[in-house]
Image (spheres, coloured by chain):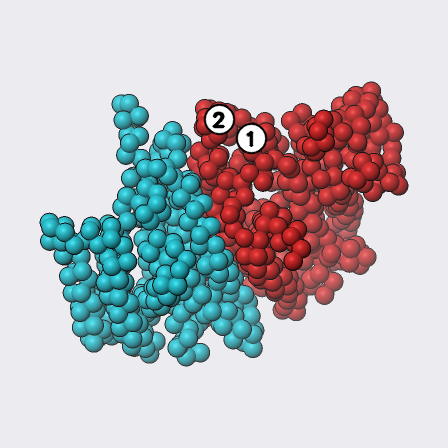
Amino acid sequence: MDVTLLYPYLPVVFAGLMGIAILVYVILDGFDLGVGILFAVAPVEDRDRMIASIGPFWDANETWLVLAIGILLVAFPVAHGVILTELYLPVAIMLIGLIARGVAFEFRAKATDEEKWLWNRVFFLGSLVTALSQGYMLGAYVLGLDGDRATMLFGFVVALCLTAAYAAIGAAWLIYKTDGDLQKRAVAWMRRALILAMGGMAAISLATPFASDRIFAKWFSVPEIVALAPLPLMTAILFGYLFWQLAHLPDRNDRFSLLPFIAMTAIMVLGFFGLAYSFYPYVVPDRTTIYEAAAAPESLMIVLVGAMVVIPVIAIYSIYAYRVFGGKATDLRYD
Amino acid sequence: MDSTALDPFILSRIQFAANISFHILFPTITIALGWVLFYFKLRYHRSGDAAWMDAYFFWVKVFALSFAMGVVSGITMSFQFGTNWPGFMETVGNIAGPLLAYEIMTAFFLEAVFVGIMLFGFRRVSNRIHTLATFLVAFGTTMSAFWILVLNSWMQTPAGFEMRDGVAHATDWFAIIFNPSMPYRLIHMLLASGLTVAFLIAGISALRYLLGDRTPALRKALNTGIVLGAVLIPAQILAGDMHGLNTLEHQPAKIAAMEGHWETQSRAPLILFALPDEEARQNHFEVKIPGLASLILTHSLDGEVPGLNDFVLEDGTIKHPPVVPVFWGFRIMVGIGMLMLVMAWTGTWFLWRRRASDNPLPRWLALGLVPMAASGWVATLSGWYVTEIGRQPWLVTGVMTTKDALGPVAGGMVLSTLLAYLAVYVLLLGAYAFVIIRLAVKAARQGDERPEPGPAGGTAIPGGKDAMPQPAE
C-alpha cells in the first residue's frame, strides 16, 4: 500500500487523537481535580479517604494533559505557538496550580498531623486554581482568543462552570469509591455542583453561537439543526436522570454507585462533541485550520504508526491499574 | 524603565533555565533510584531477608516524592516550548515533535501508571507483579531519558535532515536518533544519575548512621550507596573524557570556552584557575599546567587545540558561547567528580576493612558524606550549564539561533511569571530537603522501618491479598 495516500487524512486523524486525549484528560483529571475542589466543603475526617480514592491514579491522569499538549505541539506546531503565547498568563497560573496540588499529595502523606492542614490547603487551592484557569482558557479559546473585556468575562463564566463540572465528577467518583457518611455527603455535593454546572453549560451553549457568526451558521441551518438536535436533548435528559438518580442514592446494596460517574462522563462527552463540531476545521478559532497548521506528513506518519501500537497497550495497562485499586478506597500505604 | 531589565529574550532564557534546572533535579534521582529499588527487590527475592524490603520502603518514599516533583515540573516543560519559544517547533517541529511524542507514548504513561502499583500496591498484587511494576517504572524513566537526550543531542549535533523553505524535514530517522553526540551524552547523563543517587543514598544513610542507626537495612543502603559510587565514578570519568573528545570534534567553540583558551595553539596548557575576561579577551590570574590540555584533548603533547578567537567573524560578531559560565561550570563539575572519587573509594576501603564491625565508618567520614548527598545535583546542573550555555548562540547548532525562536510575549509578563515560578521552586526545594531529612531522622529513631506483617497495623482490604507477600523461592 502506498502510505502517501493517507497523507491528506493525517491532519484530521491527529485532530481526532488530540480530541480524544483532551476528553480523556478532562474526565480523568477532572475527577481528581474535583476531589481536590471538594476539600472546600469536606470535613477533616473525610480527607484521608478522599485522597486515598485518587492517590494511585492522579499521575497517570495528568499524563493525558501532556499527551494532549504533545499532540498539539507535534501535529500542529504553528497553532501550538499561537495558542500558548495568547494564553500565556492562564497557562502559567494553571502550571503553578498543577505543581502545588501534585506535590501536596506526597508532602501530605509525609506530614505530621499538625502540618496536614497546610498541605490540605495547598491541595485545595492548587486544584481550584488549575480548574479555574483551564475553564478560563476554554472560554477564551471559544471566543477566538481575543483579549477584550467581553472575552474575559465569558472566560470567568466558563471557569466557574468547568470548576463546577469537575466538582460534580469528583463527587461522582467519591460516590463510587467510598461508602458510609462520606458517600452520603458526596451525593449532596454532587447535586449542588450539578446545578452550577448545568446553568453554566446552558449559558455557554447559548452564548457561543451568538459570539461567532460562523458557529451560528453551523448550528442554526437546515438540515444541520435537525441532525444536531439530539446533542442538547440528550444532555438535558442526562441531567434530569442524574438528579433523579442522586435522589435515590446511596442505595442499599450499592449497585448503582457507578452510574452518576458514567452519566457525568456522558455529559462531558456530549459537550465535547458540541465544541468539536463548532470548531472543525479550525485549530486556532477563525484563524488557522488543522490543514494549514499540520506538520510534515512524513513526521506525522512516524508518530501515527507508533501511536497505533502503543496507545492500545497504554489503555490495557491503565485499565489493569484501575482494577488493582478497584473497589472502595482504603488507606494508602507504601508498605 | 531600564530596557535590558525587561528584555523578553534574557528573561525567557532565565525562565527556561529556572524551569528546566528545577525539573532535571528530580528525574536525575528517579532514573537511577528506580533501578536501585529494583535491585533491593531482587535481593529480597533471592535472600528473603526482610532488611532489603525495609531499605526499599524507606527509599520508595524518597522516590515517590521525587517522582511527583518530576511529573509536575515536567508538565511545565511541555508548555514552555509553546509559551516562550514558539519558533523552535515552527522550525524543527518535524524532528522534535516525533521524538517528544515517542517519549510521551513509550515512557510517561508507563512510569505514571505503574508508579501507583509500585508505591501503593505491595499488599494488593503478588510480590512478583510488584517487582515487575518497579522494573517497569525504572525502565520508563530510563526510556524518558533516552528520548529527551536524543532530542537534546540532535539540537547540539543535528543530522539526518534537510531544510526546505526554512523548515527542517527529516530524511533519515536513524541518523537523527543516533546523531553524533547522542551515545556519549546519554551514557554521561545516565552515569550522572547513578552517581547522584549513589551519593544521595550514601549521604542520607550517613546521617542515619551518625544518629546511631545500626539496623541491617541501614547497613545495606549505606553499602549500596558507597559501593555504587565507587564503581560508577571511574566509569564517569572515562565517559566524560570521551564525551569531551566528541564535543571537540563537533562543537569546538564549546571546548574552547570550557578550557578558557583564547588562541588556537599546540602544546596547550590545562588551565586550573583563571578569571576569563570577555571584554579584554584574555584570562587573569591563570594557574596552568603546560601541555596537558593538548594531551587530554588530542592524546598528544603537540596536538592543536582550538581557541575562542577563531569564532569571531571579521565584522566582530561573536559566534562562541559566553566564556565565564562555561569555564566555571566545567571546573565545578570536574572538581565534584574528583571529590566523589576520593569519598567513595575511601568509604569502600573502610567498609571492606571493617566489614565485621558494627561501626564501619569513622565519624569524620560519615560527617563528610552527609553534605555529599547533594553533590550529584550540583555536578549535574553544572554539567548541563556547560553543555547548554556552551551551545549558544545556537539553539540548534548551525540551524537556528536561540533568538530566532523567541515568541511575542512582553518582558513584563515573562518577568512576573518567572518570579512566581522561582518563589514556588524555592519553597518546594526547602520542603523537599526538610521532608527527606526528617524521614531519615525518624527512621533512625525508630531503628526499623519494618511493616507489621499482615493487615494488623493497616486496614483490611476486602478481596485483596492481605498477607505480606513472601519471596518467590
Q: Is residue B29 visible?
A: no
Label 2 belongs to which residue? B163
Residue B383 falls in which quadrant of the image?
A: top right
* Residue B74 percent location from the top left of the image: 51, 51
| Chain identifier of the red chain | B
Chain A colour is cyan
- Of the residues shown, which amino acid type is indicated by label 1? Val
Position of residue B241 measured from the top left corner of the image (x, y, whole percent): 71, 32
Q: What amino acid is at disc 2? A: Met
How many neighbours does mark 2 have within 10 angstroms: few (below 14), some (14-19), or many (20 or more)? Answer: few
Looking at the picture, do discs 1 and 2 lie on one chain?
yes
Identify the image quadrant of residue B454: bottom left
Is there any visible trace of residue A285 in the rendered image? yes
Q: Which residue is mark 1?
A: B399
Q: Secondary structure at mark 1?
A: loop
Measured as percent of width and height from the top left, residue A279 is found at 28, 49
Between B22 and A312, the one lying in front of the other is B22
| Chain under callout 1 | B
Please tell me which residue lies in front, A153 or B256: A153
For numbered disc 2, what is the local secondary structure?
strand
Quarter residue B438 falls in: bottom right
Q: Chain of mark 2?
A: B
Q: Quick one: which residue is furthest to the front in this view?
A: B1
What's the residue at 69%, 53% (across, down)?
B374
Toward the viewer: B316 or A301? B316
User: Which residue appears at 25% of the width and 68% of the height?
Assistant: A198
Q: Does label 1 or label 2 sit earlier along the sequence?
A: 2
As drawn, B210 above or below B106: below
Left or right of B425 in this view: B374: right
Q: Quadrant of the N terminus of chain A?
A: top left
**Residue depicted at x 14% and y 57%:** A230
